[in-house]
Amino acid sequence: MDKVVLLAGGQGKRMKAEIPKPMFRVLGETMLEWVIGACEESGLSDICVVKGYKSEMIDEYLGDRYETVLQEQRLGTGHAVMQAIPFLNKDTQGNTLVLCGDAPFIDSGTIKNSLELHRSQKNAVTVITAKTDNPTGYGRIIRSDNGISSIVEEKDATVEQKKINEINSGAYWFRTADLITALGELTTENAQGEYYLTDTIFILLNKGMNAGAYISENPNVVLGANDRKGLLMLNNIAREEIIERHLENGVEFTCTDGITIGRDVIIGEGTQILAGTVLRGRTVIGSNCVIGPDCIIENSTVGNDTKLNYVQCFDSVIDNGVKIGPFVQIRPGSHIMDGVKIGDFVEIKNSVIGENTAVAHLTYVGDSDVGGCVNFGCGVVTVNYDGDKKYRCTIEDNAFIGCNTNLVAPVTVGNGAYTAAGTTVVNDVPAGALVLDRGKTIIKEGYALEKLKNRKKKQ
């Protein structure tokens, strides 16, 4: 079975943050997850993550998804892979892919095609490479008539070798048994005094084995980030590539200022994405929508012909022909059905809003099941929390909820029932009824005039 050893022990001191470098995010997703995702898409599931700096953060992030091993001392890439030898020894018949957890742009096509080359050439090792106009800082690929003869690190390279523009991505396919053998013969006789994984190529070549290189069609496979500037570059590259993909699929952008779209987001043709919009996670947007400006949509589904303006929506479903905003929050667990209109300064939480219902403004609907064609006046609140437990409200079809109504859950407002403005509802309201509760009005003549005199004396 083919395996993956994923190197994720780097500290990234120049990032100036106390987290492992692979845990920094590109478009809201950790670099480590980008790499894992490429492996999974390639059909590789036998993965061992080599952790180091702040290893507990890697453990917490991965949970029990994959095996991990600890590199207590950072003595080079070869040393990191050595920590995975017990993992490799479980099955030595196949091949092992070694990847860097902070090089997020490795892709499934490169992984599959390089493995195909590795097998067809019967290589002991196949290096994934790329060509670049600026190879500074990268290991250079030294080719021979039969493949490659070595990889020379920047600090060990001659002047002529530094002119080579084919560079090492840090990703390799090995025959697993040969990798184990080569790791056992690594030394620290180099400029850094570390165990270079690249030295395994010398070792395997000296044993008469083949070493090859696969030039990826994706030049970004080599890219990583050593500081915040580099991390920004990765985000910009990913952002621009994803927007380009959506443009090709018929999505409209009048400008791209502040727009960030996650790599798993799906957008239907004819939809317009306006400035400042952020689409994250497994979000799906339908066709002919207008999203933005300044929307945040995360792990949510939006139907066709829907308009969202200054909306934040999380882990929810919005159906077709819906109009929401501005300044609306849709919190997790909500379902906004066809034709709903939601106006400014409204919050919906863990609720179903039925077809063609209108929630005009300044309203909170939490833990509620709302029917169709319901009208909410201004300032309505579903009082769903008593300080200990949360309860649900039910508002049936065609109900009219007057301004400044408080619905104290659990309570049901029946089909077509009305609540008068300013009413606090604590009991169920029958279908077709009106509930009115305003108390006794008291007016004190002259009270305000006396207060005004006292204020003027103090001025």
Image (tube, rainbow, N blue to C red):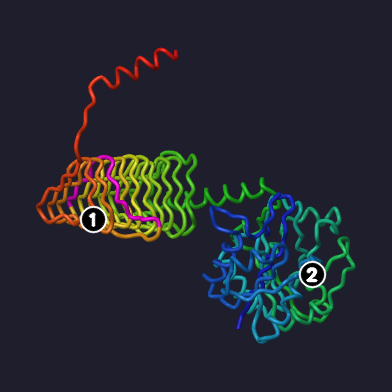
Residue 458 to residue 46: above or below: above
Q: Which residues are magenta?
A: 373-387
Q: Amino acid at mark 2?
A: Ser
Tell me the SS state at disc 1: strand
Residue 374: within the magenta?
yes
* Residue at x 35%, y 59% (from the top left corner): 390
Q: Position of residue 115 (x, y in %)?
A: 61, 74
| Residue position for label 2 | 149
Foreground residue, 13 or 121? 13
| Residue position for label 1 | 370
Alpha-carbon span between mark 1 and mark 2: 70 Å
159 sits left or right of 334 in the view: right
2 sits left or right of 455 in the view: right
Residue 290 to residue 65: above or below: above
Which SS type dominates the magenta stretch? loop
101 sits left or right of 327 in the view: right
Callout 1: 10 Å neighbours few (<14), some, many (20+)?
A: many
Q: Position of residue 218 (x, y in %)?
A: 59, 59
* Residue at x 18%, y 55% (from the top left corner): 413
